[in-house]
Amino acid sequence: MEVTRYARGLNKGLFWFILLALLLALALPIGNAGVAQAQPGAVTITDSFEDETRIASKENVAVDTAAGQVELDAVLSATYGGSGRDRFYSVYADSDYIYAAGYTDSEGQGGNDALLVKFNKAGLSIAARKVCGRSKNDYFWSIYAEGDYIYAAGYTDSEGQGGNDALLVKFNKADLSIASRKVYGGSSSGQFHSVYADGDYIYAAGHTYSEGQGGNDALLVKFHKSLPSGSYTGCGFTFQDSELTLADSKLTPGNSGLTSDDSELTLDDSGLTLADSTLTLVSCPIYTSGILSSTNLLSGQTVTSIESFGYEASSIPSETSLKVQFSQDSTNWYNSAGTLKGCDTLSAGSHSIDLSSLNWSGANFYYRAGFTSDGGDTPILDEISVTASGPQPPPPPPTGVGGEAYPINKLAILLPWIGLIAALLAGATIVIRRRTQG
C-alpha cells in the first residue's frame, strides 16, 4: 500500500510538473518575444502634379492636374481676315469672352465695313461675329461692354448728315444682334473714338468739324442707354480748367483756352446693314518662358541628410530647356554642385540628381523649375521627388521561428524543455523500477 500511495503521489507530482513545464515552454518565448516595428530611415516625397498643394507660385506655366503635367502657358495669337485689309482697334473682355472691334474690306456691303467679333477666352475660338455697314466706309474705333450689352463707337460715311458721321451701335452680348443704333453728325465730318458706359448713360468722345470754334473740335456726348429712336439736338458738354498739381511733374499748369458750346449735331437712327462675318481665323500658340516654385517638400519630416532629386519629363523638344534649382530657405538657390544661382539642366525621361554633396540636413527643401521655349514648343514635367535620410535604425534583431525578427532569449526557451525531458526520464525510471520490483 505504501508503494502504491507513493507511486500515485509521484504520478500526481509528475502531472503537475509536466503541466508547469508546458506552461513555461509556451509563456517564456511569448513573454520575451518582440513585434517587428517600422524603423526610421529613408523618406521620399513625390509630387505627381495631381493637385497644386505642393506649388508655392507659378509664372507663365500651366498645371494640368487631370494629366499630372506642368508646361508653359501659351500666349495665344489669332489672325482674323480675308483677302483685303482687316483690322482690330479696340478690345474688351468679361469672364468668358473677348470682344474685338475694327473694320474689314474683305467682306461686307462695300468699302470698309465695321467689324465686331466675339471670341471664347479659352483657345480664342469664335463665338459670334458681325460686319456692320453699307456702300461706303464704316468703322468701329472703340467698344465697351456692360451687363447684357456691348457698345461700339466709330464713324460712318454711308449715311448721316454729311461727310463722316459719328456712329454708336448697341449690341446684345449673346448673339451680337443689334439692340439700337445711332448716327450723330452735322454738315461736315465727325467721329467717336472712345466709348464708356455706367449706370443709365453712355459716354462717347471724339471730334467734329461741323461745329465749335473752328477746324477740328473735341466732342463729348452723353447718351441715355436706351438710345431712343428719333432726332435730338443740344446734347451739351462742359470743359473746366484743371487745377490739379502733380508733385513730380515739371510742367506748368495753365488755364485752358478752349471754349465750351452746346453741340447742334443731329442724332438719327442708323440704317447700316448687319451681316454675319465669314473671315478666316487662324490661331497660333506662342510660348515664352516660365517658372514653377515649390513649397517646403520636407515639412514635418525628420531628416539627417538630403540625398537626391528625382524627376520625369515626358518631353523636352529641341531648342527648349527645362532647368532646376534647389534651396533650403526659398531665397538662395543652388545647383546640385552647390553653385549659388547655378542650374541643373534636365533631360527627357526619368532621372535622378545626386544632392548628397550639398551636405544639407533638416526638414527644409524647395525646388524651382525654369521652362524656356523656342516659341512653338514647350517642355513637359510629369513628376518630381526628393529623397532624404532619417535617423539610422538599430542593428537588425536575431531571426527566430518562421524567419521573423524577435529579440529571443534562447536559454529561457530551452530550459523548460530540458526540465520537461528530465521529468519524463525520471517518471519513466520510477515506472520501470516499480515493474521490476513487482
Image (tube, rainbow, N blue to C red):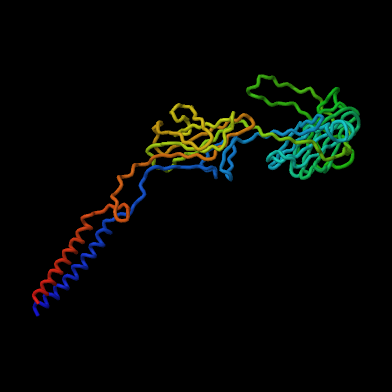
Horizontal arrangement in the rendering, residue 55 relative to residue 255 (left or right): left
Location of residue 194 in the rendering, given as x and y in whole percent from the top left corner: 77, 32
- Identify the residue at horizontal 68%, vertical 40% (top origin): 122
Location of residue 226 in the rendering, given as x and y in whole percent from the top left corner: 82, 43
Horizontal arrangement in the rendering, residue 191 relative to residue 287 (left or right): right
Q: Residue furthest bottom?
A: 1
**Please, is residue 25 above or below residue 342 in the view?**
below
Q: Depth check: give the residue in front, 361 or 261.
A: 361
| Image quarter (top left, top right, bottom left or bottom right) of the C terminus | bottom left
Location of residue 385 in the rendering, given as x and y in whole percent from the top left corner: 47, 40
Query: Looking at the rendering, which quadrant does residue 20 occupy?
Result: bottom left
Query: Looking at the rendering, which quadrant does residue 290 occupy?
Result: top right
Query: Looking at the rendering, which quadrant does residue 165 occupy?
Result: top right
| Image quarter (top left, top right, bottom left or bottom right) of the N terminus | bottom left
Question: Looking at the image, can residue 230 be seen?
Answer: yes
- Identify the residue at horizontal 85%, vertical 38% (top origin): 182
**Please, is residue 33 above or below residue 91 in the view?**
below
Q: Depth check: give the residue in front, 167 or 425.
A: 425
Location of residue 320 in the rendering, given as x and y in whole percent from the top left corner: 58, 30
Horizontal arrangement in the rendering, residue 305 relative to residue 91 (left or right): left
Question: Looking at the image, can residue 195 be seen?
Answer: no
